[in-house]
Amino acid sequence: MAKARSAPDVWMIVSIFLILALGLVMVYSASAVLAFHEFGDRFYYVKRQSLFAALGIGAMFLTMNADYWVWKKWAKLGLIICFGLLLIVLIPGVGVVRGGARSWLGISSFGIQPSEFMKLAMVLFMAKLLSERQQMVTSFTKGLLPPLGILGLAFGLIMMQPDLGSAAVMVGATLIVIYTSGARTRHLGSLAMIGVVGLVGLILAAPYRMKRITGFLDPWSDPLGTGYQIIQSLYAIGPGGLVGLGLGMSRQKFSYLPEPQTDFIFAIVAEELGFIGGATIIVLFAILVWRGMRTAMAAPDSFGSLLAVGIVGIIAVQVFINVGVVIGMMPVTGITLPLVSYGGSSLTLLLTALGILLNISRYSR
């Protein structure tokens, strides 16, 4: 492979930093009231977010300057380690329960989510596996079943926490990689139908998931229970109008809207900055996805192309689900908005992944 590198994609860098900057501003605006009430420090959440953003930017510049094909050698080991972490987090007394899911490892308020690491490890391994077996990917038994078996095992371990949101993002991004590698549409279509049946079974098997579905279909049937978050989110979005109530002027962040700095931060954006603010963030994500897909199409080898598709897929699927939940088009899943929502390990890891994507752009034809 040619070693000559050009400058990384400038559009991508600009969109990343603009989204990150808007995220830091909105984390402070959305969390100041909650932070002062809980910790006596209005800057508590934004200071922590700034710390992880700085660590993430450092990691992004490191991975941006490390040749991306080096990660191919570590893909298998990384996947094995992530599987180990997914098993460890399930051990009572070791895994930390937050938000009803045993999905964290850590001490006190500092922790990591193994499922976040699994997203990147899975697309990295799939890019390696499928780039080496491109001639076999059209075969259902030899080409498609092995990667789907690995994906299914990871999905099962994440669902044991349970964390449907992270599992959905991982599956969505990985299926995009598998489809891009050349898998037959009819094979994936048949599996999609089986997946829908399985998803219905998972929903019916857990009463709380069924309540989320009914709460999504008719939030007002349980306005103080399963429909509460969606109703409060819509109460935030509605008054925002075209230009919003003004930065810092949200009413819903005063203990009405749960998780205003994480899962529902987009609702605060729409309330304070209006349609223009929300549309600006979506346009910036669209630019990031566009340049990422352009990088994938121009990558010098299939591994780089599939890895770029996987990283872009993680972002695109997560944005789609988060915004869909906030505007009431999808059931509540607990998914954060990439680069915007408060969250340490997810922010740092995503910036690290974007560094890899930027490195691939340096070799684009």
Image: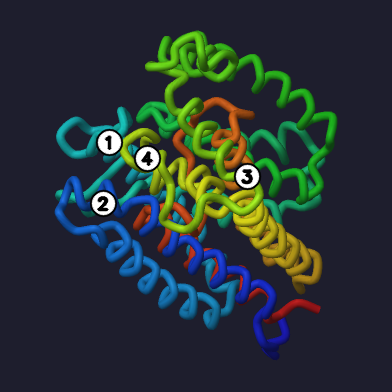
- Mark 3 touches mark 1? (CB < 8 Å): no
The disc, 1 or 2, on the residue closer to the chain's N-terminal end is 1
Residue that carries the numbered disc 3 in the rendered image: 241
Residue drawn 48% across and 37% down?
A: 154
The quadrant the C terminus occupies is bottom right
- 332 sits left or right of 111 in the view: right
Mark 1: few, some, or many residues within 10 Å (few <14, many ≥20)? few
Q: Describe the element under mark 1 as helix, strand or loop.
A: strand
Q: Residue at x 52, y 17 (%)?
A: 219
- Of helix, strand and loop, which one carries label 3? loop
Mark 4 or 1: in front is: 4
At horizontal 50% and vertical 56% (from top left) the residue drawn is 246
Residue wearing tag 2: 111
- The earlier-in-sequence mark between 3 and 1 is 1
Give the distance between the C-alpha atoms of the residues marked 3 and 1, in whole angstroms: 34 Å
Q: Amino acid at mark 4?
A: Glu
The answer, for residue 129, to whether it is visible in the render is no
Callout 1, which amino acid?
Arg
Sequence-first disc among 3 and 2 = 2
Q: Tell me if label 1 and label 2 are in contact, CB under 8 Å.
A: yes
- CA separation, marks 4 and 3? 22 Å
Residue drawn at (53%, 80%) of the image = 66
Is residue 38 depicted above or below 184 in this figure?
Answer: below
In the figure, 147 relative to 223: above or below? below
Q: Earlier in the sequence, mark 4 or mark 1?
A: 1
Residue of label 4: 259
